[in-house]
Image (cartoon, grey):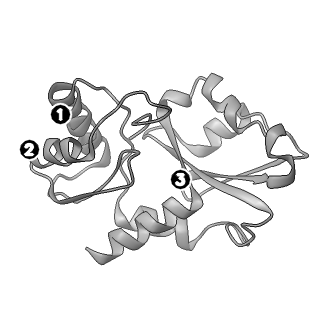
Amino acid sequence: MRGINVGGKNIVKMRDLRTCCECIGLSNVSTYIQSGNVIFESQVKGIRKLSNMIEQALSAGLQRAPVVVVLSHQQLAGVVEKAPRGFGTEPATYRYDVIFLRAPVLPWEVLPKIKINPIADQVFAANGVLYFQRLIAKASQSYLTKLVGTTGYRSMTVRNWNTTAKLYELMSEI
């Protein structure tokens, strides 16, 4: 979920988030860290349908209307296992983020609208996401924070590479 518990805003207790998800029939619900990462199983077919169900439940049950980006285990496997060569391998040199897009938004539609600072940033579109790499030595000059001003921002959520990899690991355990 985008925008949960960020900077002291949109505070949602993970216990309440889990309960809300269970109330709509999701099973084996667990959360990871305090930023709206939820892992679950569902019999509902269709990512868009499931996203809409969760958004409606959160709006009614928690009085919050976060944007929900749902990925299947297979989709997240593709994001992690098929990342661009070298992505995530030099954490002392780069910060790595994955920008997840809410269907039906596609990475190649968003990519031309994202401004990058060529001395600090690199962005790659692949596997249904955008991979964003920032040179740590130039991180203060990165344009990643300028995503907030883009028209597509409401349809995306950003997770760092470590969180993305951990979510994949947790999903693989279910």
Q: Measured from the top left, where is residue 66 in percent x and y? A: 35, 31
The Cα atoms of the two marked residues, 2 and 3, are separated by 29 Å
User: Which residue in the structure is indicated by mark 3?
Assistant: 128
Question: Residue flagged by tag 2: what amino acid is it?
Answer: Cys
Label 1 or label 3, whichever comes before in sequence order: 1
Measured along the vertical axis of the image, is residue 169 above or below residue 15? below
Measured along the vertical axis of the image, is residue 50 above or below residue 85? above
Question: Residue flagged by tag 3: what amino acid is it?
Answer: Gly
Q: Nearer the viewer, residue 82 or 29?
A: 29
Camera-nearest label, 1 or 3: 1
Residue drawn at the location 14% of the way across and 53% of the way down: 26
Residue drawn at the location 59% of the way across and 23% of the way down: 151
User: Which residue in the structure is indicated by mark 2?
Assistant: 23
The Cα atoms of the two marked residues, 1 and 2, are separated by 8 Å
Label 1 or label 2, whichever comes before in sequence order: 2
State which quarter of the image contains the N terminus: top left
